[in-house]
Image: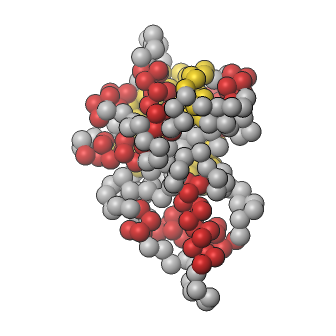
Amino acid sequence: MSLPLIGAVVPAHDEEALLAECLDGLRVAAGAVADRARVRVLVVADACTDGTAEVARAGGADVLLLGARNVGCARAAGAAALLSAYEPAGWLATTDADSVVPPDWLAAQLGAWEAGAAAWVGTVEVLDWAGLPRAVHARYRAQYDDHGEAGGPGDAHRHVHGASLGVAAAAYRAVGGFPPLATGEDVALVARLDRAGLPVVRDGAHPVATSARTDGRAPDGFAGHLRGIVRSVFTAPSGSPLGTPCPEARRGDSGPAARIS
């Protein structure tokens, strides 16, 4: 009996500088589950003008060329390709080209899948804050931590990040997949899963390392969130506390698929 297949989707727009490290992380994570699953990595090179596709191939990934310049379209196209392949994936994982998954990232998702989860929602962390003031890091950490516990084991946060997300193929198809949004396609997918009453594991124990760049590839995505923190830090009245979060203003909604990203 063959091992189950996990498809890992990496949308990328002009990411030749960071993609190799992303793929290195996925390679290590795939090795950690080699006795339980096979992993196929697909980089969706979306409207690239640099060597992203070449870096992807050199890193052992398959490449899908796209001209949408839209991260929702890119994630959806990658998922569709993996689900319609000669041997379709049974589980889809997705991360971002400027992010590095931890060694146990796929193992955590595989465990959730084996336990009957329809999806797995992870967290991110910024390891290198070079170029940004310490106050920005402090404000970000306070806001991120403020999400707090959501009510029980396996449900430890309410963040949603396309950089750390997995979903069973059947559940993905059932809710219509990623919508073609320029921003928020990840939140929209998880919201669909929640509305359908499907079991979603929210796991904060395996954070993905992501970049602290404020010039991101998706409008109002994680980089946009960091830009907002920079603005709030430098426009805060003198002497005001930098660590006082306002959750509802950050999230935009208070439902299960709320996020900071």
Residue displayed at 56% across by 57% down: 224
Q: Residue 160's x, y, as percent?
A: 44, 50
For residue 78, say whether it is visible: yes
Whether 159 is drawn above or below 248: the answer is above
Give x and y (percent) for residue 156.
42, 57
Q: For residue 214, which quarter of the picture? A: bottom right
Taking 158 as reference, is 243 above or below it? below
Query: In the rendered view, how is the structure colored?
Result: secondary structure
Residue 139 picture location, percent across and down: 58, 71
The answer to whether 152 appears left or right of 22 in the picture is left
| Depth order, front residue of 48/104 | 48
Q: As rendered, which of 162 and 220 lies closer to the eye?
A: 220
Q: Quadrant of residue 174?
A: top left
Classify the position of the N terminus by image quarter: top left
Q: How many marks?
A: 0
User: Furthest residue to the left?
Assistant: 196
Q: Residue at x 51, y 68 (%)?
A: 143
Give residue 142's position: percent from left, percent from top. Answer: 54, 70
- State whether residue 59 appears in this view: no
Residue located 72% across and 24% down the image: 54
Asked where in the image residue 241 lies, by quadrant, the reply is bottom right
**x 75%, y 60%: residue:** 130
Name above or below for residue 2 compared with residue 58: above
